[in-house]
Image (cartoon, helix red, strand yellow):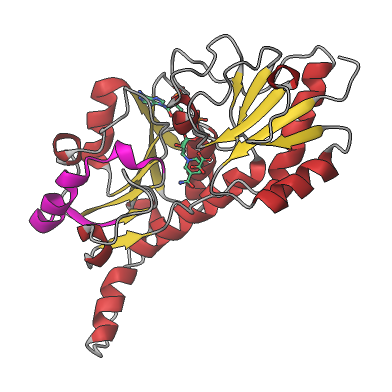
Amino acid sequence: MSRAPVLLFACQGVDQAAWLAALRRADPGLEVRVWPAVGDPAEIDYALLWKQPPGLLDGMSGLKAIFSMGAGVDNVLLDASLPAHIPLVRMVDPSLVAGMVEFVVMQVLHYHRSMPAYRQQQEVLHWQPLPQRLASERRVGLLGLGELGAASARALTGFGFDVLGWSRGPKALPGVRCFHGADGLRALLAQTEILVCLLPLTPDTSGILNRKTLSHLPHGAYLINAARGAHLVEADLLPLLEEGRLAAATLDVFAVEPLPADHPFWTHPAITILPHAAAQTLPQTAAPIITANIARHRQGQGLSHVVDRGRGY
Ligand code: NDP
Ligand code: OXD
């Protein structure tokens, strides 16, 4: 490729100006075209996608790699016409990982230190210290031990929590009780007081947070879903809260986003809602990661963080 490489930018719901400036800063030699101003489709070498319209890459005969702006590629893969032979690269960015670790630690501490109960007491002007538990006496279960799950596990063990983790294959992480497979999931859930979902959304994990699985949790457990809305069977959540199986839930992601105004989750006192903001891909750190990967590819080296299409993550 002797001409400047061309990157197609087709990302919805992001700060486009900030991204274009960051990509320009990261590699002034990269030509960035913003969809739908594609020009000659055959000239597109790389595509950066997020919630792109289906069929967008049709006719891009020179395409060499597809980049997902997010760590999760489920929305990019929704496009059935996405060329299967072109490598799909997901976002792995230490800043994104740090953002998720902050979020997980914040929410775990919120429940561990009884903040919902103190809030309720404040509302009725009630002054009453509640029993305080040691972190080592609190069992936190992480579903997913990848980039985000493993880093969250490390941070939580640093606080002294009793951390359990679940992955697809067997894993060994210092200070973490690791489980895998269907039996492993049941064993983890039975011991988990605060459950954090950091799984990719695949056919195997869709709906994994449902009445049957969550009923393995001890009474009064907490749920934090920072992965994808479709991991949770939403209709099962309210009964689980009413029965007390779950004491509260923090949800960052939803089956339909933005969460519709009439959705019952908005006003439920035991549900904390965030607008898919647990950890954002920031252009100032992510753009150089993408351009460095493109540069490596142009030098004939392999791309980093290519998705295994068979596994779906
Ligand atoms: P990784 O691919 O690094 O890790 C995925 C983990 O999930 C791995 O440990 C993997 O197991 C495990 N896993 C996958 N499938 C299964 C299964 N069927 N059973 C058990 N374990 C399974 O992903 P990341 O950590 O980078 O990201 C995880 C997800 O977080 C993303 O896919 C995205 O959906 C979500 N996310 C949400 C954000 C937000 O703001 N809310 C921001 C960024 C990401 P194994 O190790 O054995 O392969
Ligand atoms: C991601 C996300 O997958 O922001 O990176 O959800």
Is 178 inside the magenta-drawn segment?
Answer: no
296 or 63, which is in the foreground?
63
Identified at 63% across, 52% down, the residue is: 15
Residue 111: x and y, percent? 34, 61
270 or 230, which is in the foreground?
230
Count of marks, rendered view: 0
Specify whether 238 is left or right of 120. Answer: left
Residue 200 falls in image quadrant: top left
Vertical relation: 76 (above or below) 101: above
Residue 36: x and y, percent? 63, 36
Specify whether 162 is left or right of 7. Answer: left
289 or 132, which is in the foreground?
289
Vertical relation: 174 (above or below) 242: above
Q: Residue furthest left?
A: 243
Residue 59: x and y, percent? 61, 15
Specify whether 291 is left or right of 175. Answer: right
Is 229 inside the magenta-drawn segment?
Answer: yes
Decide if residue 115 is in sight here. yes
Residue 179 falls in image quadrant: top left
The N terminus lies in quadrant: top right
Decide if residue 131 is in sight here. no
Specify whether 56 is left or right of 94. Answer: left
Q: Which residues are magenta?
A: 227-249
Identified at 23% across, 57% down, the residue is: 263
Q: Residue furthest right?
A: 2
Residue 187: x and y, percent? 24, 31
Identified at 37% across, 25% down, the residue is: 202
Identified at 45% across, 33% down, the residue is: 75
Residue 127 falls in image quadrant: bottom left
